[in-house]
Image (cartoon, rainbow, N blue to C red):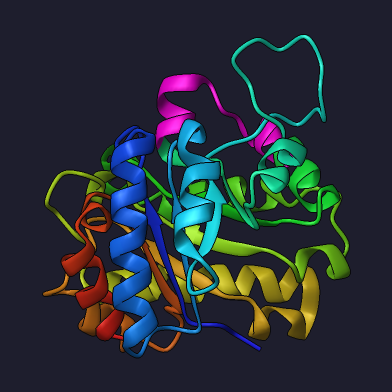
Amino acid sequence: MRRRLLLGNWKMFKGPTDSRALAKALAEKFGAGSKPDTVVVFPPALSLSTVHEALGSTIALGAQNVHWEKEGAFTGENSAVHAADAGATYVLVGHSERRTYFGETDETANRRVKAVLAAGLTPVLCVGETLAERDANTTEDVVKRQMLGGLGGLDAQAAARLVIAYEPVWAIGTGRVATPEQAQAVHTYIRQQLRLAYGTLADNLSIVYGGSVKADNAASLMSQNDIDGALVGGASLDANVFFAIGQAF
């Protein structure tokens, strides 16, 4: 069953004090009003436990990244087991900023996906093309490579636990956004590739769109048949705006 998901990636904003205040504001708003099937926020790692305590049961908690090992001599890293212990139930994997700035590859994304699943959490596998790749008409090739690379070695039972996030890199933090039709076209392609890999399971997987989603464009994006939710960046840092995006569902 495809869920309608609203995901908020706080990136490297909001330390524990500010995170607590935002989490409380979001819990109050979403607790009192209608909301998508699932709302998840992804604060910085240092704020995970603080946010978990402030959210209550209204909103789920996610981690922005994890290492593929459970523990070890990996200074500065956090594992999926640690994230679960802090209250997280979702983990972003392969976000474009991880790929661009921190050397994430399809292979390491795959290792993280498997670690997240092993910890009993839900991976949100992010895929998407740069502006140069879109202009070169290689969007489908890029998305297919990243997605199948991230899913490598997973059977249908494991794949059924994933969420896919399509985030065109050229539309992240730039103020540009894919038109609903452009986003739908890629989402349709993603679902087709999932169907080839896993059969009818693809019809039950949620595929969300990320890329400058705001209150004024959310409704048109969510109206598309294969867009099952939104991965929101900067707009998720404002409780009123994030709630307004949720109302567009």
Instruction: Check residue 144 for magenta coloring.
Output: no
Is 31 on the left-hand or right-hand side of 132? right
Residue 123 image-quadrant placement: bottom right
Query: How would you classify the magenta stretch by its main secondary structure?
Result: helix
Q: Quarter-wise, where is residue 176 in the image?
A: bottom left
Residue 140 visible at all: no
State which region is magenta: 97-110
Which residue does the image show at 58% across and 52% down from the upper left? 125
The foreground one among 19 and 137 is 19
Residue at point 84%, 55% (across, down): 154
Expressed as whole percent of the image width and height from the top left, the position of residue 216 reads 11, 75
Describe residue 127's horizontal placement relative to residue 72 as left or right. Answer: left
State whether residue 185 is above or below residue 105.
Answer: below
Whole-percent x, y for residue 213 in the image: 24, 63
Q: Nearer the viewer, residue 124 or 76?
A: 76
The residue at 35%/45% (across/down) is 19
What is the x, y in percent for residue 36? 42, 83
